[in-house]
């Protein structure tokens, strides 16, 4: 199963919106075939492994990192392929959360006389596809908020200058996170200030994530880099400005109308719900302190990815996130550290809000 999980990880940036899945076929103690789901619309992991095994698949045990599918999607059901190949036993890591599968794949295999076992290395299998499980179970993506700061928690000088607080290795690490994400989200303030492309530029990147801009008043011009056609783009707005909407449509930017919230901005929970409907599994957020803070306050953040640089910017520099004043420590936003490791000269901290960790 560990090998199946390692194979699944090869599709880290290419299977979206499908889950990352690996499969290993073993017969008489020997691996006779293996494969992984390489990209959406193409053969699933089990089919690749069966093709590699050929006739040797008969009587073999299939180790799969996710319960085999039983429904017809863009490809035929893997359950049928396993049955037709004469596989004797199927061991899967975790049940597929898709309601079209969710236990039905295992039941169909058992009904065909195949021995079935589930729950082997379930935790790492789920960690491989956090966004897919989140979307299927809650309707919204897995949200990672990226923050880059000095050691005293400052993200930019008072002038707004922030290039570059962190080093080259940290920036390359960000590109790898971008590549695995379904979408990259930013706010209009950040886009206006930095004019980012919001594309994935890691070596070997095979798919560009959707670029998402939250722009309540449609302040970002249609000529911004985020709308340059290098990747699909979508803007969420509350503005009905016909001229600005027309200019964006000319650039093939998708426009989604979202309700406002008080005291300003958009209703973030509804935006995330809509992104879930658009099959966004993992959402990478690169935004300013205001939007990052708003997501935290709304309890919509699943992970914080914080890059700390070995420098100090002083009290006049901009803060990590904007949060309302608190009177007691009991009101603070509490986090749980999940990982801390050096990335070049910087430190990457992965933390989750306490309510997400519970």
Image (cartoon, rainbow, N blue to C red):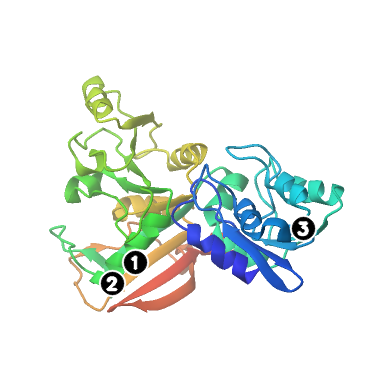
Residue at 38% across, 38% down = 266
CB under 8 Å between discs 1 and 2 = yes
Residue at 72% across, 57% down = 55
Can residue 210 be seen here?
yes
Establish if 122 lies above or below 240: below
Along the polypeptide, which appears first: circle 1 or circle 3? Answer: 3
Residue that mark 3 sits on: 58
CB under 8 Å between discs 3 and 2 = no
Give the farthest residue toward the top: 242
Residue that mark 1 sits on: 173
Q: CA distance from mark 3 to mark 2?
A: 47 Å
The image quadrant of residue 34 is bottom right
- In the picture, the quarter occupied by the N terminus is bottom right
Depth check, mark 1 against mark 3: the one in front is 3
Return the residue nearer the eye: 227 or 11. 11
Along the polypeptide, which appears first: circle 3 or circle 2? Answer: 3
| Local secondary structure at mark 3 | loop
Give the farthest residue toward the front: 55
Q: Residues within 10 Å of mark 3 (few under 14, many from 20)?
A: some
Residue at 20% across, 69% down = 315
Q: Is residue 92 left or right of residue 284?
A: right
Question: Where residue 143 appears, x then y in whole percent?
Answer: 46, 53
Q: Residues within 10 Å of mark 1 (few under 14, many from 20)?
A: some
Q: Is residue 73 left or right of residue 277?
A: right
Depth check, mark 3 against mark 2: the one in front is 3
Can residue 153 be seen here?
no
| Local secondary structure at mark 1 | helix
Q: CA distance from mark 1 to mark 3?
A: 43 Å
Return the residue nearer the eye: 284 or 272. 284
Residue at 50% across, 39% down = 273
Residue that mark 2 sits on: 169
- In the picture, the quarter occupied by the C terminus is bottom right
């Amino acid at each position: 199963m560990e090998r199946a999980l390692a194979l699944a990880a090869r599709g880290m940036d290419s299977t979206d919106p499908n889950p990352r899945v690996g499969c290993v076929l073993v017969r008489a103690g020997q691996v006779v075939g293996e494969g992984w789901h390489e990209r959406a619309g193409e053969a699933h992991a089990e089919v690749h492994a069966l093709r590699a095994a050929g006739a040797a698949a008969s009587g073999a045990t299939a180790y799969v990192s996710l319960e085999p599918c039983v429904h017809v999607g863009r490809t035929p059901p893997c359950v049928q392929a396993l049955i037709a190949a004469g596989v004797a036993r199927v061991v899967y890591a975790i049940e597929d959360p898709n309601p079209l599968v969710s236990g039905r794949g295992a039941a169909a295999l058992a009904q065909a006389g195949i021995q079935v076992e589930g729950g082997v290395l379930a935790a790492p299998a789920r960690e491989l596809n956090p966004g897919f499980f989140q979307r299927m179970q809650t309707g919204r993506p897995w949200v990672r908020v990226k923050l880059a700061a000095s050691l005293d928690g400052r993200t930019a000088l008072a002038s707004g200058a922030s290039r570059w607080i962190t080093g080259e290795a940290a920036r390359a690490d960000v590109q790898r996170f971008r590549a695995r994400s379904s979408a990259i989200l930013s706010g209009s303030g950040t886009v206006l200030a930095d004019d980012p492309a919001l594309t994935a530029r890691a070596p070997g990147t095979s798919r560009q994530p959707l670029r998402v801009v939250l722009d309540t008043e449609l302040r970002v011009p249609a000529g911004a880099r985020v709308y340059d056609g290098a990747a699909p783009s979508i803007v969420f707005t509350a503005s009905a400005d016909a001229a600005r909407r027309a200019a964006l449509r000319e650039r093939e930017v998708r426009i989604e109308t979202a309700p406002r919230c008080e005291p300003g901005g958009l209703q973030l929970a509804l935006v995330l719900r809509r992104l879930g409907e658009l099959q966004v599994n993992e959402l990478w957020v690169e935004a300013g302190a205001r939007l990052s803070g708003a997501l935290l306050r709304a309890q919509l953040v699943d992970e914080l990815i914080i890059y700390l640089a070995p420098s100090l910017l002083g009290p006049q520099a901009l803060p990590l996130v904007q949060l309302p004043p608190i009177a007691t420590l009991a009101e603070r936003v509490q986090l749980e550290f999940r990982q801390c490791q050096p990335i070049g000269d910087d430190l990457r901290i992965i933390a989750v809000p306490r309510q997400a960790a519970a």
